[in-house]
Amino acid sequence: MTEVTLNNVVKRYGHHQAVHGINLDIQHGEFVVLVGPSGCGKSTTLRMIAGLEEISDGNVAIGGRVVNDLPPRERNISMVFQNYALYPHMNVRENLGFSLKIAKRPQAEIDEAVREAATILGLDELMDRKPAALSGGQRQRVAMGRAIVRHPDVFLFDEPLSNLDAKLRTQMRVEIKKLHQKVGNTIVYVTHDQVEAMTLADRIVLMRDGHIIQVGTPLELFNTPVDTFVATFIGSPPMNIVDGVVTQNNTIRLSDGQEIPVPSSARGGIFTGQKVQFGFRADNLSPVGHGVSEDGEGAEIELTVNLSEPLGTETILFADLADTEVQGKMLNPRPVAPGERMTFRLTLDKAHVFDAETTNAIRSN
Amino acid sequence: MRRRLPEWFLLLLPAIIVIAVVVLIPLLFSLYSSFTPYKLTRPSSLWKWIGTRNYERILEDWKFWAAFGRTILVLTIALNLEMLFGLGIALMVNKVTWGQRTLRTILMFPMMFSPILVGFQFKFIFNDNVGLVNNVLQSTGLTDAALPWLVDGRLALFSILFAEIWMSTSVFAILILAGLFAMPRDPLEAAKVDGCTPWQSFRHITLPFLMPFIYIAMTIRSLDVARAYDIVQIMTGGGPARRTELLWTLMSRTGYVDAKMGLANAMGYVSILLSIAFTVYFFKKLSAARAELGMAG
Amino acid sequence: MDRNQSHRSRRRLLKVLHFAGLFMIMAIICIPGLWIVLNSFRPTVEIMAKPPVWSPSFTLEHYQAMFAGAGEGGVPVFSYFRNSLIVSIVSTFIAILIGMSGGYAFARYRFKGKPGYFVGLMLFRAVPGVALSLPLFIVFARVGIIDTHFGLILAYVAMNVPFTIWLTDGFFRQIPKELHEAAEIDGCTRWQAFWKVEFPVARSGVASAAIFAFLTSWNEFALASQLTRSVRSKTMPVGLLDFTAEFTINWGGMCALAVLMILPALILTFIVQKHLIAGLTFGGVKG
């Protein structure tokens, strides 16, 4: 069993603290994605697990064994780097077999393991090439092959797809997921791309400024964000956030005087006069008859469309709501001219209310 | 547990030890002996402390000042001309579309020559009797009499400068050429379209980009300006009548011929300070130029 | 039309000037060396002839004399060549080991006062050989290593280490640090990661640093002229002076020795010239 446990892990560079006491339990075979904007400490955390960065405080355990002072080679992990870090003077075969050669395994065993990894990743044709003669996607695959050859307890991925173009990235994302299903190891994966996080993770760890903001499954983070940061970080397009004040009759008054009913999910946690931020996704704002269902809690608002982005099956509409630009989605689209005034329906089932000061989500339990 | 030395220091340690033993200790010794009337022939004189008298004697000695001034003059002229020639050659070679590799290889030619060899080579070529220059001049009838290239003071200084520049211009040419190769095309093309004359785009785009490369060359050169000693020593030995005496030849004459070690070491210190001043100056320029182009890191 | 015409003729003129300029420069660079080579094959009588003889004849007499051990004028060129070779190769090897370790420290570790250490080391390289030769001579004489290979090797190692550090620092810095991290994760110790991954990748750079060190040692005169005394340790640059008697100079013999000196340097430089330039610029610009 190879769970990874982070217990109050801290990283300090001189006076600057990059990671502030992180606690995290990663189960055996789980695919965990650390995600966050750049500089949030996610890579540092990964590098501390790898042993490439000293742990200033707290401890990291792999498979129940505290590894704080063990060098990387004794942690039985493998890692895929952002720039792949393939050894330029070795061909693909030698790159794949390097770790086993260092471990002084018999040649037959090395050959067998290398062949196996090559087959899994479709590298058989490329075995005698040097990294310089490979395309970006092929290099990426070799880097992954190098990681699986050793059958490590834990795979670490440090932004492995960020150097690839969009198309290849989607393709490799699928391959990584397949790989995980095939080998079933514990994976810790770092990225700044929320789409990658959503598509790959069993569990997402969202970080900011060296703190963990929220941990949960992709759907948990998407549906019940703990604050506006999570709400705007996860999901595309980002959640619309509009400022407002709670009134006596359970509505939120926006800056232009318009009032929207407080969603029932938040009713228990608010008080009159509270400054709040009202959040809803583009999926929940559509012109009447073009997407959002007419049932359930909802509100109808008049909006002037500033801009429309047709995507084929849907069109993203940009409009100003109380001086804030919001986005809505139009299904079964028809052409929309800029300046057109339309009636939108906003469903409140999946809308969120956040406290304006703390930015935390308000939910009645 | 005993606190161990950091790894970086252990890695640097061999270098530090070797330099300390071979350079630092002798330098400290020579610093000490520059305060004594030490003569090789009389070892006991090493223990007599005379304070700064050697330095005072140097400062009062017009021969020293003449050599010092001449050294500065020669270095200034040589470094500037080397830079200009190097720049010119690099620009010309950069324009060539055919056989560039060969030209570059030829450019490296003088870099392989030992300074002593350069000195000898030009002593031969400028020899008033059998030298190539005089032979050509006389055969073509440009002059009747043999020009005393290494005997006349001014001509000798010219010959030495020629040798020095011949030897060291390639360092500049090669490095500036490397800079030209590394230069992005777009800004130059943008300037052309924006209506810059060739001179303007050189002055405002090419040159600023090349500055760090020029300073690298300057820094590398400043590390061994004293190699000029080898050339002068061979070509004229500081003569005729001290007309080409540089700090270094004066020092070696004082030390080895006159055996006045204390005095020579005092001069040595002046020359060391001079070299260090050059090096530090160019290092500073180099990092400033780098910072300006955002290459620091 | 006229403007086009004038621009075209101006361009043509510039082209001619450009070509002529390049030709002159290359001539000035090449002729002195070629002249030496040429004269090493001419009989002394012809070199000294007045008026000059322009149609050269060919002789190997200078080379024969040179390789006969103690040839004309009794210059033991063969011993000088051997001394030069031993001193240069051994000192280069040691300087590269020491310099590489220092360069690696600068490239891979962060520590306080790094620029200070770096410039400090460079300054020791800037100490003029002549200024150093006086005290070094006295110290070496005390220790008793004047006129030995060991003494000269020691001096050259110290002289070459700073510049080797400069060059190797630049080369190691070009190698992404993820490479040794990957190697460490693959099971290497730091030592293995260096020798199995970083060193092979930087090999050509290290080779060019070695060439530089070799050339410096091979060509050095100021120190060698004081630290060597006899056939036991005299190197070729010092040996060159043997051809200069009080008033006469054996030009032909000197030329032959010069050719012998320049040949190894020439060959070595051509082998690594590409890396040589890359090394100098990377070390400097991206420092």
Image (cartoon, rainbow, N blue to C red):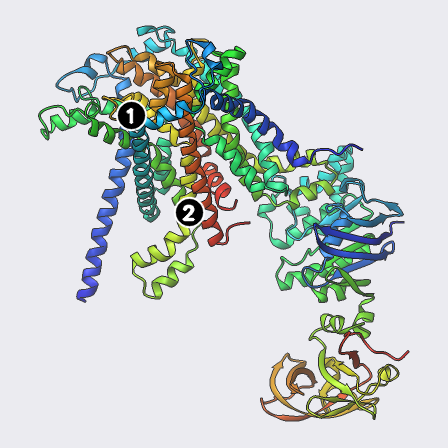
Label 1 neighbour load within 10 Å: few <14, some 14-19, many 20+: some
Marks 1/2: CA–CA distance: 42 Å
Residue count near mark 2 (Cα–Cα under 10 Å), binned few <14, some 14–19, many ≥20: many
Which chain is disc 1 placed on?
B
Residue C205 visible from this viewpoint: no
Quadrant hosting residue C106: top right
Can you see residue C144? Answer: yes
Q: In the image, is residue C252 above or below residue C74? A: below
Question: Earlier along the polypeptide chain: callout 1 or callout 2?
Answer: 1
**Amino acid type of disc 2?**
Gly
Instruction: Please state which of residues A72 and B128 is positioned toward the viewer in this rendering.
Output: B128
Q: Is residue C166 left or right of residue C192?
A: left
Q: With B217 as the anchor, is A40 left or right in this view?
A: right
Q: Which residue is mark 2?
A: B179
Task: Establish if C7 lies above or below C92.
Answer: below
For the N terminus of chain B, the quadrant is top right
Residue C108 x %, y %: 62, 41
* Residue at the disc numbered 1: B63
